[in-house]
Amino acid sequence: MNSVKLGLIGLGTVGGGVARLITEHHDRYLEHYGIDLVIQRACSRSEAEAQRLGLQEGVFTSDWRDVVSDPDIDIVIELIGGEHPATEIFEEAFKHGKHVVSANKALLGRHVEHLASLAAEHGVQIRCEAAAAGGIPVVSALEHDLVGNEILTIAGIMNGTTNYILSRMQHEGLAFEDVLKAAQAAGYAEADPTADVDGFDAASKIAILASIGFQTRITTDDVFMQGIRNVSATDIEMARDFGYAIKLLAIARKTSEGVDVRVHPTMIPAAHQLASVDGAMNAVYVVGDAVGETMLYGAGAGSFPTASAVVGDIMALAEPISQGKDPIPEKEPFGRNLPIRSINQLTTRYYIRLSVEDRLGTLAACTNVFAQHGISIAHINQKETHDDEACTLIYVTHEALEKNVMQAKAALEALDGIREVSSIIRVENIDSWAEGVFAN
């Protein structure tokens, strides 16, 4: 049996959790799996972090190059995030024959083709379970447990910050800005929450999962992205009245026109399993043609949930290494095997909230705009506001084409008497996710 030497780059929230898991569970890993994990080098800005984690003297370095060039290290664990120097860490690790485990969704969501090609060229592997949905083992499920299926849909709540915000808005009737401030104070949201509340974090994750599930190249830049800043307490109240909940969903579907991949606030039936995912928790819904509908639920972030996924990847690589064998090299990355379907081709129902001047003829003028753009209305609701000269009009459409809805939005904004198109939220056709599942 060979010891498996690890180089850990980043000793922050996740890196510290990884170090603690490996240290505290070392003997159990050895006893039950025959794997002796050794943290050979650990890189951070401050040696105090290494000391706090109880790492042995001589392990710490402040230069990541000491880690990737160490001839004894088998696996490099990149946990600093961002594009640079993370990209250089991957590249140099591969050149030195090191496998890489990473939780870097932003990097992999955009540049996995380049990195996977390099890994394949050098005969090593990238593993990234922690880069998509934290501690939820969805990458492993797609790569191993569900390979007997054609994957039809991958959808879910993949950002805990936005789910926490929307959950509190739903339960307490609070405004977005108020909950965001509370989330920042509690540590659920970053000081700059842009990546979370504007959808980039979830878009990176769904790009990774869709690439794996559909075996085609999808990058974060391919994902239609809309955040939750415009979701109001009124929208959540109206959704409840209509029998829906509002969630920021990441959705990828395989269609006859290509892959439909998007992140946006979404109304889903209140009885659906995803609607009950509360607080900062995540859930990923995967539909295969044979297995049908499945859902994986758990913590999508945090020190130990994410460290759990990282250590799982380390152990998968360490098993053959400990027996003196080489892990199977990375496969050549998927090409663009399937086209990406434009959001303009989406057909679904829409919830539309308008702020209008409270005067005769405004309702009829708005309804006429929808008719001119081929949009049929299922429900109309008028709500009074604190402004005596304005009111809120709420429309719910029958199925309509996204392109037509956006053209109608522009026409509404040009109408006299329309103060604002305040909110447009897609009402997801959940049944379409299971189209193509085999009948039992």
Image (tube, grey):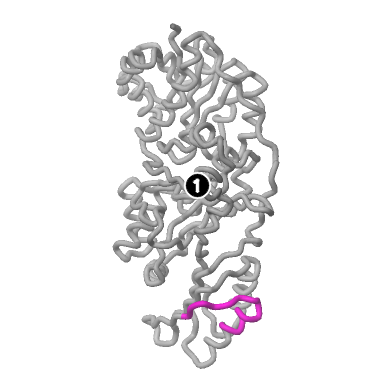
* Region in magenta: 367-380
Q: Is residue 25 left or right of residue 394?
A: left
Q: Is residue 182 left or right of residue 150?
A: left
- Determine if residue 180 is in view: no
Q: Within 10 Å of the Cα at label 1, are there few (<14), some (14-19), or many (20+) other Cα atoms?
A: many
- Determine if residue 63 is in view: yes
Q: Farthest residue toward the top?
A: 1
Q: Residue placed at 55% from the left, 18% from the top?
A: 327
- Name the image quarter holding the N terminus: top left
* Residue 226 at x, y percent in the picture: 53, 57
Establish if 260 lies above or below 217: below
**Mark 1: which amino acid?**
Gly
Q: Residue placed at 45% from the left, 13% from the top?
A: 4
Q: Residue placed at 66% from the left, 56% from the top?
A: 342
* Residue 188 at x, y percent in the picture: 35, 47
Mark 1 lies on residue = 292
Give the image quarter of residue 297.
top left
Establish if 192 lies above or below 415: above
Q: Farthest residue toward the bottom?
A: 360
* Residue 75 at x, y percent in the picture: 50, 19
Establish if 151 lies above or below 383: above
Residue 374 versus residue 248: which sits nearer the camera? 374
Q: Secondary structure at mark 1?
A: strand
Give the image quarter of residue 56.
top left
Q: Residue placed at 57% from the left, 26% from the top?
A: 90
* Residue 30 at x, y percent in the picture: 35, 13
